[in-house]
Image: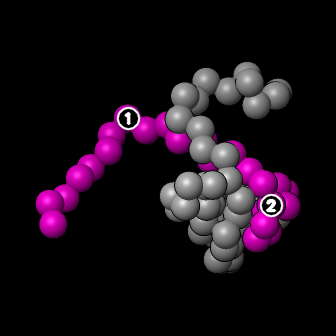
C-alpha cells in the first residue's frame, strides 16, 4: 500500500527530531520545515520496524474525531 492509498487528509512532512523509547510504547517527535512539532505515541515495535531515528524523513498522518482545547 502506497502513501497515496491512505485516507488521511492531515499530513505533515518532516524529520524525526527525537525518539523516546519505552518497553512497549514510544514517543516520536516530528519537526516540520516550518518548525511545528508533532508528537506521536506508537508501539516500540513499530518504531523499530519503521527505522525511526533522528533525522529520518517521515510524514505525520493525523486523523482524529476530537480535538480538545483548554483556555490559558
Q: Would you say 58 lies left or right of 62 here?
A: right
Is mark 1 in CB contact (under 8 Å) with mark 2? no
Say which of marks 1 and 2 sits in front.
2
Q: Residue drawn at (67%, 53%), measured in percent from left and top?
A: 14
Image-quadrant location for residue 56: bottom right
Name the secondary structure under disc 1: loop
Toward the viewer: 1 or 55? 55
Image height of 26 relative to 50, above or below: below
- Label 1 vs 2, first from the N-terminus: 2
Mark 1 and mark 2: Cα distance apart in space: 28 Å
Instruction: Place residue 4 in its image quadrant.
Output: top right
> Residue under circle 2?
56
Q: Which residues are magenta?
A: 49-72
Q: Confirm whether the magenta stretch covers residue 28.
A: no
Nearest to the observer: residue 64 or residue 15? 15
Looking at the rendered image, the quarter that the N terminus falls into is top right
Left-right relation of 63 to 42: left
Type of secondary structure dominating the magenta stretch: loop
**Residue displayed at 76% across by 70% down:** 54
Badge 1 is on which residue?
65
Amino acid at each position: 500500500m502506497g502513501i497515496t492509498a491512505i485516507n488521511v487528509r492531515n499530513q505533515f512532512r518532516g524529520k524525526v527530531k527525537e525518539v523516546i523509547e519505552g518497553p512497549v510504547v514510544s514517543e516520536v517527535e516530528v519537526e516540520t520545515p516550518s518548525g511545528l512539532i508533532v508528537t506521536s505515541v506508537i508501539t516500540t515495535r513499530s518504531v523499530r520496524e519503521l527505522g525511526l531515528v533522528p533525522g529520518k524523513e517521515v510524514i505525520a498522518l493525523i486523523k482524529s474525531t476530537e480535538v480538545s482545547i483548554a483556555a490559558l
